[in-house]
Amino acid sequence: MTRADRKQEHIQYALSTGQERKAGFDDVAFVHQSLPNSIVEDVSLQSKIGELYWSSPIFINAMTGGGGEQTALLNERLSIIARETGAAMAVGSQMSAIKNPSERGTYEIVRKKNPKGTLLANLGSEATVQQANQAVEMIEADALQIHLNVIQELVMPEGDRDFRNAIDRIGLIADSLKVPVIVKETGFGISKEAAAEIAKTSVAAIDVGGFGGTNFSKIENQRRRRILHYFNNWGIPTAVSIVETTSSARPKPVLASGGIQNSLDMVKALGLGASAVGIAGYILKVLNESGLDKAIEEINELQNDLKFLLCALGCTSVSELQDKPMILSGEVYHWLKVRGLEPDRFSQR
């Protein structure tokens, strides 16, 4: 099977496997503020991610590219959504276009359709500095995502089996590029130990890419003869991973993605310590089922919802959510407690 064929299969399986409520946000609640002393008009959604300023904390996370006409069309539509809503957007891994230049157009389309937008290039941790520069140049990117996907590679029939020295390559790329570098997981979460290692480099931000969203183990298992069931529920739930990562990565910004399905999930993620929230499977489903205009409308409505939620909590900015008391319960509370991350402190803010 070619890399392009695999890219197309990933999209099909992402839609068919769907998402479950396993990201942990149902175990998180804000303490209601009866006297918020706020007004919706004063709420700003602007977010600062390292050196980047985003008009909204919502960004469209990496999905695809390199799979021929089908992925080019999807990236075109996603870039239009980003342009019309002011959201930042990441493309999928560009290694396919680096190895096969005929696939460059499936990525270049995003800059053509969104010439003034914030775009993130994307490569795996196996990439070299030269390849990283190629990926950034390809879409005139404002930043580069380096994705970590050990479990996906292990389950993938033709995947990598050698994961040595990834942090050294990441550090070298972050030191060499002229744009910020963001390290992200792909659905299995980042622990406090991994976050501490990443934070030692000059990486600009960390995207936790937690468990609970698109499940690449399930996707790759559908492509295997012998199913590796034990990886299908493997990972750190997104709500937990936000706290794990912020506990070790501060002051580096932390981004949240993985199973974020509505505006309340977003506000909870921001309250737990994230600076922005990424959506992928959620918006892909809306786009596939209801079309381009509905997907644009959905993100605009999510942004309006965020303003209402911030107003209800007495916040005028996204960062102020991290001062509001929250109650953690269930598996999220238990996980953080046994990991020594003091979940009770959130209720005393």
Image: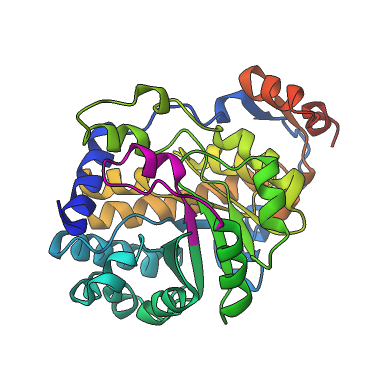
Residue 140 placement, left or right of 66: right
Q: Position of residue 253 (x, y in %)?
A: 68, 58
The residue lying at 56 percent from left, 37 percent from top is: 238
Residue 305 placement, left or right of 43: left
Q: Nearer the viewer, residue 98 or 304?
A: 98
Q: Position of residue 292 (x, y in %)?
A: 24, 57
Q: Nearer the viewer, residue 1 or 320?
A: 1
Vertical order, 43 against 154 (above or below): below
Residue 280 placement, left or right of 343: left
Residue 349 located within the stretch drawn in magenta: no
The residue lying at 44 percent from left, 66 percent from top is: 127
The residue lying at 70 percent from left, 41 percent from top is: 192
Q: Position of residue 305 (x, y in %)?
A: 52, 46
Vertical order, 308 against 183 (above or below): above
| Residue 114 location, quadrant | bottom left
The C terminus: image quadrant: top right
Vertical order, 204 against 313 (above or below): below
Query: Which residue extends farthest right?
Result: 348
Residue 155 located within the stretch drawn in magenta: yes
> How many tags in the picture?
0
| Residue 193 location, quadrant | top right
Over which residues does the magenta segment extend?
A: 146-165
Residue 198 placement, left or right of 293: right
Q: Is residue 9 visible?
A: yes
What colouring does the structure picture have?
rainbow
Q: Is residue 272 visible?
A: no
